[in-house]
Image (spheres, rainbow, N blue to C red):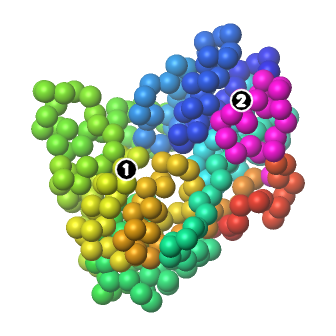
């Protein structure tokens, strides 16, 4: 068990689970700090200090680790959060602070799945142009420019509410924001002030993005994951989706859209992950907790990026 504080780089369900379990295990209430890079807060409050915002590059993170007396960094960020993972490795190397990666396994195709894995977002756009007429994009706003030149495809773009635009206060400063309400939640706020999780297609309106998207023909739907199988199935049926484009993120929370696609015969294009940074790695919160408490060693050691067991290339 580290004698100093633990910095948990989060943003995933696995990170939130580990944070709660560490808070129960550690004697000091502030023994673990959870850092989130974006606007999405955990669906349930975490019983430990939380910061939201960037560190200011490798040098800023290095300074933070030293000032906060961090004794261990756990990188439990999203598999596509390649920048912060690279910064964490470099900062930990410079300060000689141990680092553990919690990387959830990728999804694997089963009987009846029609998957096509591509190595880049540009590859996804090329694959889409060959077959799709009505596509569901669940990639986030930043990845949409590669689809700008495609015509003859009706896009349904699913975004988080905050992803419709870049708030003016989201620069290099650290900030904390409230989780946005859905459109119907706003109308019902006097009856029930608690925001709802998930995406109920029957009660959510199509949302015009605050800033136009670089697509020829599209509509935007906003929500907050995880989505149920019923919600995913209904969305694909009502929008007559023939192709789903997603990142190879892995995890149980995103499994519903793949199940719905299989049931409805929807073709799935998956963008391969960036390769993980080298170092010690575990696949679950259980394994991470055991490693931190000293009762187990990691199931994998990533000696180099090319040795990563999960396929993918850095974008």
Q: Residue furthest top?
A: 27
Within 10 Å of disc 1 (Cα), the crowding (few <14, some 14-19, many 20+) is some
Specify the label residue 69 is tagged with: none
Residue located at (33% from left, 40% from top): 197
Q: Percent position (x, y) of residue 196?
A: 29, 37
Residue located at (54% from left, 33% from top): 16
Callouts 1 and 2 close, C-beta under 8 Å:
no
Residue range highlighted in magenta: 278-299
Q: Find numbered disc 2 in the image and state the secondary structure of the residue it sits on.
A: helix
Q: Is residue 212 left or right of residue 286?
A: left
Q: Percent position (x, y) of residue 81?
A: 59, 52
Whether residue 93 appears in this view of the structure is: yes
Position of the N terminus by quadrant: top right
Image quarter of residue 207: bottom left
Q: Percent position (x, y) of residue 70?
A: 73, 25
Measured Cα–Cα span from mark 1 to mark 2: 28 Å
Residue located at (75% from left, 53% from top): 277
Residue located at (53% from left, 29% from top): 51
Whether residue 95 appears in this view of the structure is: no
**Residue 274, relative to residue 118: is it above or below?**
above
Q: Find numbered disc 1 in the image and state the secondary structure of the residue it sits on.
A: loop
According to the picture, the residue beneath numbered tag 1 turns out to be 227
Image quarter of residue 102: top right
Q: Is residue 283 left or right of residue 77?
A: right
**Residue 113 lies in magenta, yes or no?**
no
Q: Percent position (x, y) of residue 67?
A: 70, 23
**Residue 298 lies in magenta, yes or no?**
yes
Q: How many marks?
A: 2
Specify the label residue 289 is tagged with: 2
Give the camera-side residue of 185 and 88: 185
Within 10 Å of disc 2 (Cα), the crowding (few <14, some 14-19, many 20+) is some
Dot 1 or dot 2: first in sequence order is 1
């Amino acid at each position: 068990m580290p004698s100093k504080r633990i910095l948990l780089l989060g943003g995933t369900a696995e990170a939130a689970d580990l944070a709660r379990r560490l808070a129960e295990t550690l004697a000091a209430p502030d023994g673990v700090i959870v850092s989130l890079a974006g606007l999405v807060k955990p669906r349930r409050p975490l019983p430990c200090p939380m910061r939201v915002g960037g560190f200011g590059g490798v040098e800023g993170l290095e300074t933070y680790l030293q000032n906060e007396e961090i004794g261990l960094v756990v990188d439990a960020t999203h598999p596509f959060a390649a920048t912060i993972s690279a910064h964490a490795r470099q900062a930990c190397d410079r300060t000689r602070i141990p680092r553990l990666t919690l990387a959830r396994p990728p999804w694997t195709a089963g009987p009846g799945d029609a998957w096509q894995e591509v190595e880049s977002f540009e590859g996804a756009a090329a694959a889409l142009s060959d077959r799709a007429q009505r596509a569901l994009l669940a990639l986030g706003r930043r990845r949409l420019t590669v689809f700008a030149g495609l015509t003859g495809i009706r896009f349904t773009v699913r975004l988080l509410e905050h992803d419709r635009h870049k708030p003016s206060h989201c620069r290099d400063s650290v900030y904390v924001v409230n989780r946005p309400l859905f459109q119907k939640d706003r109308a019902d706020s006097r009856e029930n002030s608690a925001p709802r999780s998930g995406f109920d297609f029957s009660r959510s309106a199509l949302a015009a993005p605050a800033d136009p998207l670089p697509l020829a023909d599209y509509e935007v739907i906003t929500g907050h994951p995880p989505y149920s199988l019923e919600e995913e199935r209904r969305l694909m049926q009502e929008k007559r989706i023939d192709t789903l484009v997603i990142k190879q993120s892995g995890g149980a929370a995103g499994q519903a859209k793949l199940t719905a696609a299989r049931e409805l015969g929807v073709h799935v294009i998956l963008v391969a992950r960036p390769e993980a940074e080298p170092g010690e790695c575990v696949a679950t919160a259980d394994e991470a907790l055991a490693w931190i408490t000293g009762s187990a060693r990691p199931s994998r050691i990533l000696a180099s990026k090319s040795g990563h067991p999960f396929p993918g290339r850095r974008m």
